[in-house]
Every structure is written in C-alpha cells, then in structure tokens.
Amino acid sequence: MHGRTSPLFVGRKRELEFLGEAWQAARRRDTRIVGVRGVPGIGKTELVERFLHTVPGVPVVRAFGDEEASAHPWGVLNQIAEQLPTPVLARTLAGQGEAAFVGQALAAELAAAGELIVVVDDAHCGDRQSMTALRLAARRLRNAQVLLLVVHQAAAHPEGADPGTPRLELHEGWTRLFDSAQGRLIQVDGLGPDDLVRLAVATGHDGLTPSGARRLHEHTDGNVLHAVLLLDQVEMHSINFGNGPLPAPRGMTQAVVSRLASCGRRTREVVGAAAVLGRRFGLADLRALSGVADVTAPVAEAVGAGLIKEIPGTAGQEFAFTTLLVWDRIYYDSGVERRRALHRDAARLGGPGALWHGIAASGGGTDGELAALAEREARSHLSRGRLPLAAVYARHAAELTPPGPDRLARLLTAAETLLVSGDATVARRYESEILAAPPGPWRDYVAGYQALIAGRVAEARRLFGRALEEAGNGAESPHAPADLRARIAAQLAIIGVVEISYPEMVEYGTAAVAAGSREPWVGAFAWFARSLGWALAGRAEEALASLADADLPGSAAGLDGLVARGMIRLWTDDLEGACADLREGVARATRGEALRVGQALGFLGEAEYRRGRLDDAVRFTRLAVGDAEENERVWDYALLHALACYPRAARGEWEPAREHARQAAEWAPIVDSRVSIVYAAGARAAIAQARDDARRLLEAASTIEAHYDSLEPGTHLFGPVGADALSRLGRPDEAEESLAAFAGRAAPSGRRSALMTIARVRAQIAAARGDHARATGDCEEARDLARQVGLPIEAGRIDLVATRSLHARGRHAEAERLLRRALVAFNRTGAAAYAALALTTAGELRLSVDGPNAAFGTLTGAEREVVAMVCEGLTTRRIAERRSVAISTVETQLNRIYAKLNVTNRIELRAVLSEPGD
C-alpha cells in the first residue's frame, strides 16, 4: 500500500516527470534503476511518496537502511524478502548465502513479479551485504517490469558522530549503475522561492512575503525541513525584513555542535571568527581577525570536520561554510559580547563588509559618522530597487544618529523606506517622534504615508494636501528628496482611487508621472497610481495602451505597472492576461524586484476565482491576507478579507467565509474609505448569493450602490446587485427601475461581464412577471457572454435561472439538461454551495440529475481541474504544465476520472459533458 502523501509537498514538477517516464519505461520491460540523491531534509522521501501516489494499484516493496547497519547483516534484504510473493529469496537468506547467490535469487524473483516498484530509502545506511546483493541483482535485471528507486544522500558522517568515524555512502558501483543505459540519477535540490511561498501556506504560515521567501531560500537553500523549522520557530517579521544570518533552527544542529566540539580549542576560536566574517571568507582576513598567524592547521581540521570547504579556483586562499545551517549555528554559538568585539575588529579591516561590521558592533549606541555611511548605503540600495536592504540600512542610520539637526531627516527617510518595503510595523515605532517634529512638506508627506497605511484616510489626505501646497510654494524642507512632489501626488492619486474620486485619481495620477523621478521605485508607483485612476475613471483602454511594455525589462512602469496592467485586464474581462501579469509580478518580486503593491496576490486570487479555479483563489487570497496582517497594512484589510471570502463562499465553506466577511465589516468603518465599505458589503453579498438569500443580498446591495458608482463596471461581478435581489424577492417593477439605472452607466462600456449580469437579471425580472419565453432568451444571451469571458460559475448560475423558466414552459427535458449542465459546472470548479443550490432546484422541480454527470460529486478537486482543462481542449502535456505536475500524474488522474464517470476516453468524456448548442 502506498504511503500517504504529505501536505508539505510542493513543486518538483521536473522530478515527478522524470520518475513518471522511468516507470513508463519499466512497464515496457525496460528496467530502470534510479538513484534519488539529496541532502537530509531536502524532500527526497516526500518526492518518492508523491510519485507513488500517481501510480495507484502498482505493487510497491519498501525497505529502509539503518545507521546501525553493521549490527543487522542482511537487514535490507530481509525487509524486501518479507514483501515478495514467493519465498525463494527468504530461503536463500536463511541459508546465509553469498551476496552473488542472493543477488541472483533476488533478480529472478523480481523479474517474475510482474509490474513492481522497489524503494530502498536511506540506502546509504544499508548494510553492506544487502546493498551488494541488491546491486548485483539490479545489474542482472533485463526485460523486467521493475523500477528500483535507491534513495540516498551524498557521502556524510552519521548525525552526531565523531568526524573520524567512517562516512556513510553508497558503494561506487552504484554510481556506475546509475550511469548505465538502465540507470538514472535525480539530484533533488532545494525548492525555489516561489515554492517556498506555497510551502508556507501549506504549513499555516500565511504572512511570508515574496521578499521573505527569497531570504528564506538564501538561508535554507530550499531545504524543506530547514525551511519549515524556521517558519515554525522564527518570528515571521524577522524572516521578511531582517538582515544577516537567521538562527539555526532547533532540531537541526546536533551534528554541527558535535563536529565543532570535536575540534580543538584553537580551531573553535578560528571558526568562530570566520563566522563573523560571513559565509565566505579569505584567509588573510581570518588571520587578521583571529589573531592566529598560521591558521593552516585549524582550517584543515575544520575542513576535515565538514564545517568549511575550500572555494575552487582561489589557490586555497578563500573558504566558505559548507551550508548556511553550519554558518548560522556557529555564528550564534558565540556570545553576544564576543561577536560584538569581533565585528568591531572586522570593521577595522575595511572592505565592502566594514559598514555592516560597524553597525553590528555598535551595540545600540549612537555614532554620527557610522550613521552617515548607513544613510549613503540605504540610498544606494534604494536607487537600485533593493527595498528591503534599503530599509535595513535606513533604519540603522536613524537609530545611530544622535539628537541634532540630522536626526529628523534620517528618521523621515527610515520611516518612508520601511513603508515602501512593506514594513509598517517597524515604521510605526517612529510615528510619535515624527508627529512631534515641526511641520514641513517632507515631514507632512511621511506622516501622511503612515496615516494612510494605518487606515486613517482623512488625516492622510489633509497631510498630503498641505505637503503638496507647501512644496509648490517653495517651502523649505531640509534634506527632502528632489522628487517629493511626485511622491505626494502618487499618494493623493491612490486616495482618489480608494475614495472613488475621479477628478483626484486622474489629476494626481497624471501629475505624479509628469513630475518624473530618477528613483525607479517612485516612478513605478506613480505609473501604478495613474493607470488605476484612468481605468476606474472609464479610461481603461487608454491605461492599457500606456502599459503595453510593462512586462519588458527597463519599463518605466516597473513591476508596479505590470501589476496595474494585470488588475485592469481583470476588470476588462481579459482573465488569461490578468493571471499572466499578476503571476509574473509576484514571481519577479519573489526573485528580488521592487514591488510596492501589496494587493497583487489578492487580485490574482480574484482572477482565479472568476475563472472557476477556487483552490488557487483560496491559496492566493489567503497569502494576501496573511501578508497584510503580518505587516499591519490596515488599509488593505477590508478589501483583502472580502476577496478571500468570495471563493470560500462559492465552496460552501461557511465558517471561514463568514469570518472573512466579519473582518472586512469590522475594518471598513475604521479605515472609512468608500472602497473598504464597498468591498466589505461585497463579502456579505458573496455569501448571500451562494446561499440564495435574496433578503441579505438586498441589504448588501444598498451599501454597494450607495457608495459605488464606478465608471468601470468590470471591477466586480455583482453587476446590478440591487435589481438582482429585488427580482428574486418578487418585486419586478422596482428591479426594472434599478436595472435601468445600472445599465445606463455600465452598458456604454461594452464590458461583457457587465452585459452578462444585466441580461441575467433581465431574465429574472421577466420570469418574475411570468414571461418565461423572454427569460429563456435573455439567459441564452447571458450565457453566451459568460462563455466568451470564461466565467464557468456565472454560466452555471445563469443555467439555474433558465432551468426554472424552461420548466415553467413545460420543456421539462430541456430544463433537466440545463440543470445537469449547471451541476457539472459547479462540480468541476468545486463550487459546492452552488452545486447544493442546483440539487435543491432539482428537488423542487422534480427533475432528475442522475446519470454520468451526477458522478462529478465523487471527483476530487484536482480531478475536477483536469476535467475542466480537457473540456478546454488542452493536451495532457499542456495540462501537466499548467498544473505543475508530471505527465504521468495527469494520465493517472484521467484514468481515475474515466472509471468514475464510466467512460473510456476524452471523446466520451466530452460527449458526457456535451451541452445543448455546443
């Protein structure tokens, strides 16, 4: 029986593809012996478990190596013998035969077993007799349907053992076998930053930012175990915004401590000094810092203990710690005072690391000269878009500055840089001191920025307005940036957006770009503000045209402009383009590019929600909420909680949906912006829609329509929500009046999603008046628009409306067909709440939804995604690429789908799902 897959498994598409191809070769009687190699904790075993999950029903034989192998001769082979169907191998072992004879018996028994996967985990710890016999057996296997997976790590000492003990490693004969025609070797490396973000969500750590994922990757090399332990044990804020080494997690340091303790006192002192120099260091600096004239012997001992390694090509003059884990543990092993003293001495050595050593040695005191250097370093990082590092140095510059004229300027720089990098938590510590300072354009701008992030929109508007006026009148503001007016205008444009003030969003957005800035991050945010302002003011096409090159390197719009383009594409019904832009924006931020827009993940989640990919929608919106809460971006709370509510409501997950709606409702009046109030009402509307609760939908609609008259109707899918509720409550005259008002604003835009909702509500009004023929025609128009945009859940909701009108007209067979079609759409996407509404409709109208389509309720979420992609016409390879899994995984899922739906191929599957008019 296969082991249960771990929820920690993410990524590994290439490796799964590799294993899938090896198994397909073995099934064709082309035996494969595959080595799966990687460092401890990297995820080798989880990779194998996930692969086995893709081949259900295939017999699997498992064995495990043991670090006490010498005490268990034939231990691995005995485990294998117990699981084989015939006793040949067991009898041979009972006779304690030679490895050659045991290997021959094993080869014969494996060849006779038919399709079989043999997994030997921790093979580097396997006993010598077993591993020799297994290797000999593998060499004899020909024309057998066998896949042998040898899971092992590179040569290493047993954990906690003295470095003088023999290293655990596979016999070199295995390497030759992996290099043979039958053999393969997978080197399992660490997860990338993107996958670490997914890992964080899977383990309940929703606050990891893209820059935090990059830092976590730098410190763990993507090692799954190391990353999870750090996420569990280290404050998220330190991961997202800190600098220098992260502490080595508890539970992974025993071997490091043991090896360091096995070294002599002189070596321990030298290695401790090396850790202060950094992960990589030169011998000249090490001699100077440690005070040891000849470090040859200590370095050699540390190399022998596996603590450090020579850097190739440096003629033995440069070394590095073998892993970041080793460096972290040894760095923090020194006491605080000793580290500070070593940093002080290291600063005197000069070089590129001198500034950081000086800061680390300062011990919380003030130093005007060091502060000036830190300020210069912060500006350098800012100019290159390295926002997190800029924030670190700007903060140190402020804290190192003694009271005096330079203190306020550095404090303002630090606060703004922290806010720009997303660290509102630390920036808030300076707020009282900034507010106590004399007013001025620079001070008012930073104070306004802090107020805006904290959700005090009215206060922010007042401060920004005063700052812009004073800056325009030439008021002096010592040390203020030259592009201060561009910065202020961009923030005022954003306030125009959240307040839905069209003159302000257009005027200030245009002014922000026109003011220009030599700082790329300032210019990019100005483009973001202007683009969103234009879009919401009904100039979306103009905004998109200005952002045509936003995805190209060196674009003036920067990464913020790319995110803006993704959001506008979402609102203009280009869902594929929106997802592409928003995914790329998040991925590039994870790789280190500057991104100021914290809502990118949230709107990516909404794009996936509209496309009916609810699993992705939940994941991305959950990340967005966690990021905002971790970094105290109060003004984002209501919007992001509302976006997180949408997919939860559609899936019928009422408790988390209500909690998101409650949080949105709680924060909206605190922030008191029109956008926050509208999105909080939108969360309530999403739940009311999914529960078919017209009364509560009308309550939410009154709030939405009182505060939102957007000139861009595609910003949400609720459309004429008031008319929608009134038509369902049997009040067609009021509904028609409300619909006419909405259509007068929205229809001229030609936005298909808006026209779709207008047509659906028009159908509901006609049905309420008993004109079911007209209702049916309006539903056909609405559904055609839903299909054009790619809105499967909306299409299913339209079919529910059409079902009732067709039934009322006596066209029961057609009504039943549409109802089944709706149920298929809801089951494919995992919209369980709407599937329940479809079943309720079936019961009320006494329509049957039995048959092949009813079996969709038995499909898993992943299987429903595959079905949806098959219906889109995607090939197996394209489905695998989109879902980041192996082709063999998709093939296995398709086979399970065929079995559940009682079909044999794609053609029959599509026939089962055929829709009237297709």
Image: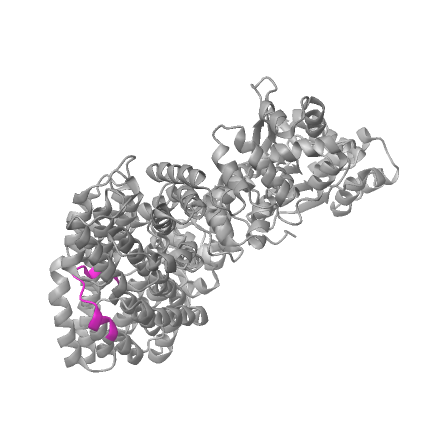
Position of residue 58 relative to residue 615, above or below, is above
- Residue 748 in picture, x, y percent from top left: 11, 60
What x and y, as percent, mark residue 794? 29, 63
In front here: 835 or 604? 604
Viewer-proximal residue among 793 and 223 = 223
Q: Residue furthest bottom?
A: 730
* Residue in the picture at 18% in, 63% down: 710
Horizontal arrangement in the rendering, residue 8 relative to residue 676 (left or right): right
Q: Where is residue 346 in the image (x, y as percent from the top left)?
A: 56, 32
Q: Looking at the image, which residue sits at the far top? A: 315
Q: Tell me which segment is drawn in magenta.
A: 703-717
**For residue 580: magenta?**
no
Q: In this view, does 149 lie to the left or right of 601?
A: right
Within the image, what quadrant is residue 285 found in? top right
Q: Does residue 662 appear in this view?
A: yes
Q: Relative to 797, is 403 above or below?
A: above
- Say if 913 sits above or below 820 in the image: above
Question: Which quadrant is the C terminus positioned in?
Answer: bottom left
Residue at the spot 43% in from the left edge and 59% down from the top edge: 622
Inspect this view and state whether residue 20 appears: no
Q: Is 712 inside the magenta-drawn segment?
A: yes
- Provide residue 424's location: percent of width, then percent of height: 39, 55
Q: Quadrant of residue 744?
A: bottom left
